[in-house]
Image (spheres, helix red, strand yellow):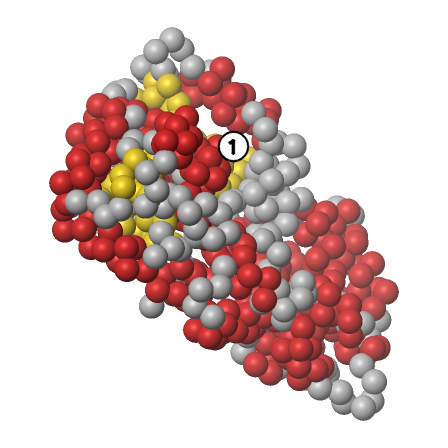
Amino acid sequence: MFRMIIVEDEPRILRHLKEKITTISSDFKVLGTYNNGEDALVELHWTQPHAIITDIHMPIMDGLELIQKIRKIVPEIQCAIISGHDDFQYLRQGIKLGITDYLLKPASDSEIQELLEQMKEKILLNQKLLEGEVASQISGVSTAPDNSLTNWSKIAQELFYHGHYILVYAWQPQGDFPEGLENLCENLLNEGEKYFSLPSVSANERILLVGVHSCSSERQQEWTKAIKNLVVTGNGITVSMALSTKGIQPIPELLEQCKAQVWVQSHFGGYCFWLSNTVPENIQHLLESYQPFTQRLAQFVIKKQKQLFFKELDLLMSGEQNLQVPESRKGWEQLLLFISHSLHNLSKDSIPTNFETMQAMEAELSDVVWSVRRIHELFAQIKEIWSSYFFKTENEPATNRDWAKDAKQYIHNYYNENISLTSIADHFQLNQAYLNRLFKKAYQSSIPDYLVKIRMEEACRFIKEHPFVLIKEIAEHVGYIDPFHFSKAFKQYTGYSPSDYKTK
């Protein structure tokens, strides 16, 4: 089934077209309907249509401009125009843009059917478009109603015909990948071999599928060495590779295994490994050796000796404590949670902490382990989080001011501006980890999550009152600079794209 969007500013014609296409052809599913070109362009990143039918004369962005912009993003999309204007100049511009057909309103059933057949035929002849669709099926990001690989097995066998495949899965906490991963893989290919870039569900991922004639252990070592030289740069990139000797069918399962193992094997300094050679790090034997260290830290917390507390941490980080440290992110997460839990147990009778505070702190430690790129960034964040043991005593005035309530009111007052946890904490001159912890305790939500909630609720209300407003204007109304970012956030929160929500 092929995905289609319709762009038409007359609601009656828009509904008619959608109903006719649904009735006439089971090969096409209309995933988006829009009354202007700009909204269609904003949501192109998630509708990923194979075909588009558009009017010419529309507000904000007309159909010809829309096709021109879409061609620059996805040249393979099949485009058709339906217009009430029998104007040769429009037809001439459409031909220059490579449209499939130019229909005049009102289009008959036979004209619509002929158009859909032409589009289907051209899509099936377009190898790149089909490769992209099969790739999205393999990686599990297709928006087609049936997301199984079996529906595409015949096409997959024709396009992905190699007997052996190397799957390359790369993960980086901030999506900051070096240029050249694709070129590196291409340079490692022999004649007749081919690589494909697969779509991913996250900006933190890169997925390559490489069709090869064979892959000996010597060749695997060659790939490991080449990729290690690229990724071990301190950017925190972890690459998992897997070999399929049974063609394309095992790839979806191997991809899931690669993702799971990257979560276990990821290193701060960058790491590369084959799925068949994975040995998870076990740090349980290290934890007992950390007990004297945690006891000293706890004493510094109890006595409010902040400088000595951080000096002790610095000694650990510089390696002067003679304590073995983990290699993987998972190992660091386990160690930090062990230290945090020990600190809480050893100091709970002397300082006013509770179970909820400990949980919030440990959640922050876990988050930071998986969000920073380098080990020194991790150390800086650890010190900031644990500084909250001293922060309240040193900085909170005796007035018992309700910082969480003040932060909540600030969000309600300024959600439509470019604010964040950092800017809110700066406004109150507070440590952001401390403020976020207070907020979680008071409202069972982090400040970033609460800010998104308020913005999305206001966006829903605004759409109901102004159903024909542009997505760009909705985004600006609730504090988003980028309408694409807003569209993704809105769909994640509501389950609908902004245009579908407007239709509802």
Q: Is residue 372 above or below residue 253?
A: below
**Among the 4 quarters of the image, the one containing residue 392:** bottom right
Where residue 48 appears, x then y in whole percent? Answer: 37, 43
- Residue type at mark 1 is Cys
Quarter of the figure that contains the C terminus: bottom left
Q: Residue 143 versus residue 287: which sits nearer the camera? A: 143
Neighbourhood count class around disc 1 (C-alpha, 10 Å): few under 14, some 14–19, many 20 upward: many
**Among the 4 quarters of the image, the one containing residue 179:** top right
**Among the 4 quarters of the image, the one containing residue 480:** bottom right
Q: Residue 335 versus residue 431: which sits nearer the camera? A: 431
Q: Which residue is mark 1?
A: 272
Where residue 488 appears, x then y in whole percent? Answer: 47, 55
> Left or right: 337 with respect to 249?
right
For residue 298, say whether it is visible: no
Which residue is located at x 82 percent, y 89 percent?
398
Which residue is located at x 25 percent, y 21 percent?
161
Quarter of the figure that contains the N terminus: top left
> Left or right: 291 with respect to 203?
right
Where residue 384 appears, x then y in whole percent? Answer: 74, 62
Q: Is residue 266 above or below residue 217?
A: below
Q: Is residue 178 above or below residue 353?
A: above
> Left or right: 133 with respect to 418?
left
Which residue is located at x 51 percent, y 45 percent?
203
The outermost residue toward the bottom is 399
- Mark 1 residue element: strand
Q: How many marks?
A: 1
